[in-house]
Amino acid sequence: MERFRKALESLGIPGHERRDLPESTGRFGDGSQYRLEVPGIQSPEALDALVEAASRLGVTINRVTETRGIMRLTDDDIRRMVATAKDAGAELVLSIGPRATYDISAQAKKENFEAGRIGYRLRGSEQLVRALADVERATALGCRGILVYDEGFLWVLGKLRESGFIPKDTIFKLSAHCGHGNPASLKLLESIGANSVNVVRDLPVEILASIRQTVKIPIDIHIDNPSSTGGFIRTYEAPDFIRVGAPIYLKCGASVFATHAWPTTEKEAAMCAKQASLTQRMIERFYPEAIQTKAGSRDLAIPA
């Protein structure tokens, strides 16, 4: 095995998990180590409820992610969400598609065991075109964060951002539904345009440490999950995630939902803020020197 470990190391990839848990020296552009993200906020009403609850609880939400698809939002929905996120000094990330599950593909249907093999990826050139139309509409209305479910489309977006076809200040976040969980995968995604990658939800901290030793982009990781993807709650691990994974987005609140792409209610959105505050409390107790990004930081992809 030693020969194979050295082969990986020659490519800049750890040849074994970093069980020594080296402390990360990586930081966001503003010098912070971590940010709190709430996923699955699907409407302007839910976003308003989240922001109000977070303010009441005294917790800073740095990023909010919508996961049902830009095509399911009206222009007015997007404008309202853009305005709310901008006022809160937070990033707003809107999702393309997810196309395969909305398509006629039998393989992508939930009752089919093989559905996971296609995930939310795009099918054919026509869906690439439609996804681009989604991105253009969202960015034209001020959104500067896009959630991507397809590695090929990520490559397309990266190239079109370089050319100026897509605003150069737009960030691309790759979804956990793509199933990436090793240093080589993240190295590839970083090279084709990812600004952050949501790794699979159940990675132990030593694998997270190996990934951090390989890439510079932020890592996104779920602190809690709905039962459909494990139902686990990892608040006690948040301090260690920050120590070894910075810069890192800690995703809070998904355990509130029955499943992913759930049409979030205002009550559920407020409960997400509570889960974020519980995560923040754990950090303040066990890693009080950890630095969180402040609301409105110039380093955030705040809506234009």
Image (tube, helix red, strand yellow):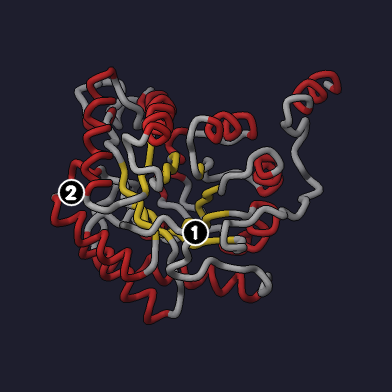
The secondary element bearing badge 2 is classed as loop
Instruction: Specify whether 228 is left or right of 31.
Output: left
Q: Nearer the viewer, mark 1 or mark 2?
A: 1
The reply to whether dot 1 and dot 2 touch (C-beta < 8 Å) is no
Rendered location of residue 274, percent (x, y): 42, 72
Q: Residues within 10 Å of mark 1 (few under 14, many from 20)?
A: few
Q: What residue is rendered at 49% in x and 43% in y?
A: 195
Viewer-closest of 82 and 50: 82
Q: What residue is rendered at 38% in x and 32% in y?
A: 163
Q: Residue furthest front?
A: 164
The residue wearing badge 2 is 73
How many numbered circles are shown?
2
Viewer-closest of 283 and 191: 191
- The quarter of the image holding the N terminus is top right
Rendered location of residue 116, percent (x, y): 40, 28
Viewer-closest of 264 and 91: 91
Numbered label attached to residue 299: 1
The secondary element bearing badge 1 is classed as loop
Rendered location of residue 301, percent (x, y): 41, 55
User: Which amino acid lies under the numbered mark 2 shown in the image of this protein?
Assistant: Leu
User: Which amino acid lies under the numbered mark 1 shown in the image of this protein?
Assistant: Asp
Q: Residues within 10 Å of mark 2 (few under 14, many from 20)?
A: some
Q: What residue is rendered at 58% in x and 36% in y?
A: 181
Asked where in the image residue 82 lies, by quadrant, the reply is: bottom left
Residue 108 higher or lower than 175, as above or below: above
- The quarter of the image holding the C terminus is bottom left
Rendered location of residue 186, percent (x, y): 58, 35
Res 2 seen here: yes
